[in-house]
Image (cartoon, helix red, strand yellow):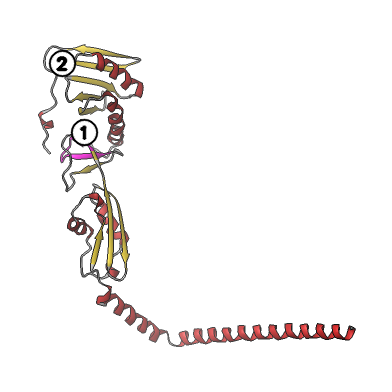
């Protein structure tokens, strides 16, 4: 029995040594192959470079890798030909010349485009997806501009926009890049949102650096002075006064006071908006 155990122990030990030797032989073979490959590359660098350059040039200029189709997301409502023109991607150009980042930046250079995504689908397709800024107001400026829901202004887009948007005045002689002007425009979407509680469409929001905001209603001869600062409570108080005020009676609602709205009726026609506000767009 003891002899049998010693025999099995010796066999297991021999098997382990044999397997270890096989692994070592495999590793040595792989190492020799790698060494030979590195040696070959070091001996023939110029020939390999020339060969690789030939391959890359062949692939880059082969007609198989040319743009044959531009797939455009139509959710923005643009004509496909227009978006393709903005992107600079044309049928027949090399797929390798389509740089997605560069094309995205080219699309975003159109101020009315909010986001742009470009993807190459080899060997022959390019996918373009754009989303546009939705105008919520018209900024009276030269040239006229639009304002989106984030308070960002953009120039006249190349598509038809609604004409019943409120005007934002007071910025025609102001540098829009100035901090004060940017902050004043950024507050307009919130003002429009709060004013919806009145259920009275706005014709104009006027802003002045000293006086702040004044709102003009579209269907009533009422001017609402808000001042530099405003709050939801302030809009709620104005709404209560509007509900009690005669629809045909012209007045100025001064809401710049704490916890009250001072109403100043006037007999004649209210000071009409500037003639420049006569829907020129």
In this image, 30 relative to 74: left or right? right
Nearest to viewer (mark 1 / mark 2)? 2
Residue 77 location, x and y as percent?
A: 21, 50
User: Looking at the image, which is closer to me, 75 or 26?
Assistant: 75
173 in the magenta segment: no
Residue 249 location, x and y as percent?
A: 16, 14
Where, by quadrant of the figure, is residue 197 drawn? top left
Q: Which mark is residue 171?
A: 1
Q: Is residue 273 above or below residue 116?
A: above
Q: Which mark is residue 30?
A: none
The residue sitting at 47% across, 87% down in the picture is 40
138 in the magenta segment: yes
Q: Quadrant of the C terminus?
A: top left
Q: Which residues are magenta?
A: 136-148
Q: Please, which residue is most extreme toward the right here?
A: 2
- Most common SS among magenta residues: strand
Q: Secondary structure at mark 2?
A: loop
- Residue for badge 2: 248
Where, by quadrant of the figure, is residue 162 drawn? top left
How many residues crowd around disc 2 within 10 Å: few (fewer than 14), some, or many (20 or more)? few
The residue sitting at 30% across, 64% down in the picture is 99
In this image, 80 relative to 187: left or right? left
Q: Is residue 230 above or below residue 114?
A: above
Q: Earlier in the sequence, mark 1 or mark 2?
A: 1
């Amino acid at each position: 029995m003891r002899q049998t155990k010693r025999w099995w122990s010796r066999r297991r030990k021999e098997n382990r040594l044999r397997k270890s030797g096989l692994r070592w032989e495999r590793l040595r073979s792989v190492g020799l192959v790698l060494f030979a490959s590195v040696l070959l590359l070091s001996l023939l660098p110029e020939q390999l470079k020339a060969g690789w350059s030939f391959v890359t040039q062949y692939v880059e200029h082969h007609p198989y890798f040319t743009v044959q189709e531009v797939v455009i997301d139509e959710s923005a409502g643009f004509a496909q030909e227009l978006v393709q023109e903005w992107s600079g991607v044309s049928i027949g150009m090399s797929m390798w010349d389509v740089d997605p980042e560069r094309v995205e930046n080219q699309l975003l250079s159109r101020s009315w485009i909010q986001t742009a995504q470009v993807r190459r689908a080899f060997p022959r397709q390019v996918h373009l997806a754009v989303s546009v800024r939705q105008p919520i107001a018209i900024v009276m400026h030269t040239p006229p501009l639009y304002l989106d829901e984030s308070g960002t202004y953009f120039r006249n887009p190349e598509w038809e926009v609604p004409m019943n948007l409120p005007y934002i005045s007071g910025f025609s002689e102001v540098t829009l890049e100035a901090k004060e002007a940017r902050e004043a425009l950024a507050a307009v979407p919130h003002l429009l949102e709060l004013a919806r509680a009145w259920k009275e469409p706005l014709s104009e929001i006027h802003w002045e650096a000293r006086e702040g905001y004044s709102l003009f209603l579209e269907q009533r001869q009422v001017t609402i002075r808000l001042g530099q600062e405003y709050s939801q409570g302030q809009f709620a108080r104005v709404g209560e006064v509007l509900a009690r005020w005669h629809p045909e009676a012209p007045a100025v609602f001064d809401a710049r006071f704490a916890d009250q709205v001072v109403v100043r009726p006037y007999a004649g026609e209210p000071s009409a908006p500037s003639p420049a506000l006569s829907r020129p767009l």
